[in-house]
Amino acid sequence: MLKPALLAALVATPAAASEIWVTNEKDDTISVIDVETLEVTRTIPTGERPRGITFNSDHSRVYICASDSNAVQVMDPETGEILHDLPSGADPEQFVLSPDDRYLWIANEDDAVTTVVDVETREVVAQINVGIEPEGMAVSPDGKIVITTSETTNMAHWIDTQSHQIFANTLVDSRPRHAEFVNEGSELWVSSEIGGTITVFTTGDQSEKAKIRFEIDGIHQDLVQPVGFEFTPDHKTAFVALGPSNHVAVVNAETFEVEDYILVGRRVWHMAFSPDHSQLFTTNGVSGDVTVIDVASRRPEKTVQVGRFPWGAATRP
């Protein structure tokens, strides 16, 4: 039986707050936003030019692409201490962690390769030649397929995770930036920044299923540049960051029709949902802030100032 004093202490201890972690390219820092208060509670130093960021499945480790340090940094999110660096190849920009938390698949923009790193042994398992300027990375839910998108080659490269071999290359529009598997891995979505589109593929035969285009009244088409995107848990709705148009598009992921546009900060890059998916946090590079969107109303509710050129975002429940 707990002693009264210990019981009182346990009751008085507040539950850990959910957080949004944002990488700041120009400040070499991470801003940590408390989801409840919508305030920055910590600013954590990183390597040079942090961009991609992801947590492992139990959120005990956070991985950061320190692009200009040519390293993936592994951090303890409780203390903010960088535990060690992983070999990453040159200029890591985005990465994806395998569903079993064992392997990081990293896009090396300067070397036109995808690097596979075993996070336990801290060794490079493979380097796979892909197209010029690889950036976007995605992994299928079953862990059998990894996608690398190459910005200059304008392709999505389909990689078998067992053999480390490319088994298909599919063309997309100009400058692909981000990729995600959806609907239990049956579809792949790829955004094309300069092309101004998202291409949807059927995973089974890599055929093109749909092309999503965006048009915002009063904004020149050249400024409508899709980059990152996130799906609601039921995969029925996608929110798409549209870069220097300063808007997020709301897309019906079943009909592929654009339903709404939401005004956010300047040059929106990427996004992360709150743990309950009631809020969406966008990283706005040029304005140096994060827009908090109420998902139900599809309206911005607050702007949170962070560091210079916020880029990546990840949720810590």
Image (cartoon, helix red, strand yellow):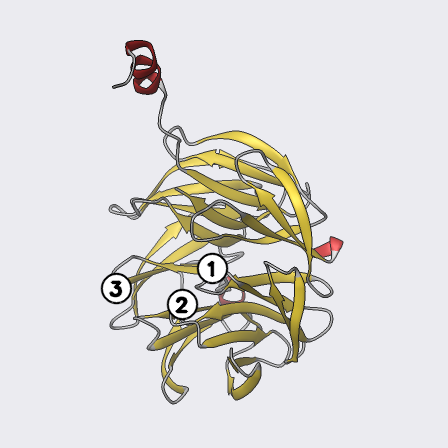
Check disc 1 and report its element: helix, strand or loop.
loop
Q: Amino acid at mark 3?
A: Lys
According to the picture, the residue beneath numbered tag 1 turns out to be: 242
According to the picture, the residue beneath numbered tag 2 turns out to be: 214
Q: Are marks 3 and 1 in contact (CB under 8 Å)?
A: no
Which part of the image, by quadrant, shows the N terminus?
top left
Does 189 appear above or below 285? below
Quarter residue 307 falls in = top right
Residue 178 in view: no
- Residue appearing at x 43%, y 58% in the figure: 218
According to the picture, the residue beneath numbered tag 3 turns out to be: 236
Which part of the image, by quadrant, shows the C terminus?
top left
Does 32 appear above or below 47? above
Q: CA distance from mark 2 to mark 1?
A: 9 Å
Across and down, in percent, residue 260 comes to: 31, 58
Query: Badge 1: few (under 14), some or many (20 or more) residues near its Cα, within 10 Å?
Result: many
Quarter residue 153 falls in = bottom right
Does 102 appear above or below 154? above
Q: CA distance from mark 3 to mark 2?
A: 18 Å
Q: Which residue occupies the extreme top position in the image?
A: 5
Q: CA distance from mark 3 to mark 1?
A: 19 Å
- Residue appearing at x 39%, y 32% in the figure: 17
Q: Amino acid at mark 2?
A: Phe
Q: Are marks 2 and 1 in contact (CB under 8 Å)?
A: yes
Across and down, in percent, residue 25 comes to: 65, 48
Check disc 3 and report its element: helix, strand or loop.
loop
Q: Amino acid at mark 1?
A: Leu
Check disc 2 and report its element: helix, strand or loop.
loop
- Residue appearing at x 31%, y 48% in the figure: 277
- Residue appearing at x 61%, y 53% in the figure: 51
Across and down, in percent, residue 280 comes to: 37, 47
Q: Nearer the viewer, mark 3 or mark 1?
A: 3
